[in-house]
Image (cartoon, grey):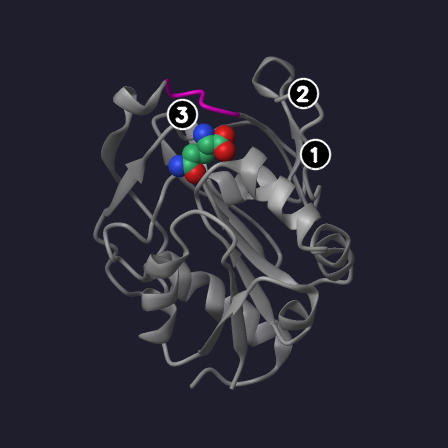
Amino acid sequence: MITIGVLALQGDFEAHRNILEAQGVRVIKVRDAQSLQECDGLIIPGGESTVMSQLCERYGLWEPLQARLAAGMAAFGTCAGMILLAKGISGASRNFEQQTLGALDIDVARNAYGAQVDSFEADIEVPPVEAGESAEPLRAVFIRAPQIVRCGEAIEVLARHGDQPVVVRQGKLMASSFHPEISGDARLHQLWLKGVEKESGSEIG
Ligand code: GLN
């Protein structure tokens, strides 16, 4: 059985945990370097990217995280989690000295859809988890969401909102601008887990 960690320093990690547990994987909360070492893959939830990166530093997680990602650990970042995984944060939206893990070859602009009051929901077309399955649109919740402003060559765009890429994948790394866990729709988690399972060679459940 594969073990999936949910970075549980700040943000809405419980909703991710609930979705993952329903998929039959072992789920652990990651708050230190030791628990990170047990994970086959890691969810980095939404929240506040500046706070999350500061807490990672404080709990001695930043360098181990970078090292595991560089060694090919799977990760799925949602909203603030996407910001943390990105290569870069576009100038004006970057907080002073804000760093990223740099694993996913995208650049993002923070808060590009506006402030909290501009939060919105939209129906997004997503690829089916299994080929041939019908794909109902997924209800996506955007809360002070980042926009992807650059995609590197290795990036596969899995979903868009208008012209804007909102779900991207690069091998075992996936990220969404919005919160897929809030609506309780498990499909993006399932899509990511399928890739993790394929590459790790172990079975889910
Ligand atoms: N605006 C937040 C940030 O920059 C992300 C918001 C979210 O995760 N819902 O970190």
- Asked where in the image residue 89 lies, by quadrant, the reply is top right
Q: Residue at x 28, y 39 (%)?
A: 141
Viewer-proximal residue among 140 and 100? 100
Q: Is residue 130 visible?
A: no
Q: Residue at x 56, y 18 (%)?
A: 93
Ligand 1 location (quadrant): top left
Q: Tell me, yes or no, whether the two marked residues, 2 and 3, touch with CB atoms within 8 Å.
A: no
Between label 3 and label 1, give the one nearer the viewer: 1
Q: Secondary structure at mark 3?
A: loop
Circle 1 sits in a helix, a strand or a loop, which is it?
loop
Q: Quadrant of the C terminus?
A: bottom left
Q: How busy is the neighbourhood of tag 2: few (under 14 within 10 Å), some, or many (20 plus)?
A: few
Indicate the secondary structure of the residue bearing disc 2: loop
Q: Left or right of 182: which side holds 44?
A: right
The residues bearing labels 3 and 1 have C-alpha atoms spaced at a distance of 27 Å
Q: Nearer the viewer, residue 26 or 29?
A: 29
**Residue type (three-letter) at the residue carrying disc 2:** Phe
- Give the alpha-carbon distance from disc 2 to disc 3, as whole Å: 29 Å
Pointer 3 residue: 163
Closest to the observer, 109 or 117: 117
Neighbour tally class for label 3: few under 14, some 14-19, many 20 plus, Cα within 10 Å:
few
Please say whether residue 69 is one of the residues in the magenta stretch: no
Q: Position of residue 67 (x, y in %)?
A: 78, 57
Magenta residues (range): 110-114
Vertical side of 173 occupied by 157: above or below: above
Q: Nearer the viewer, mark 2 or mark 1?
A: 2
- According to the picture, the residue beneath numbered tag 2 turns out to be 96
Given the current orientation, which residue lies at the most extreme top position?
92
Whether tag 3 and tag 1 are in contact, CB under 8 A, the answer is no
Residue 52 visible at all: yes
Callout in the foreground (2, 3): 2
The residue that disc 1 covers is 99
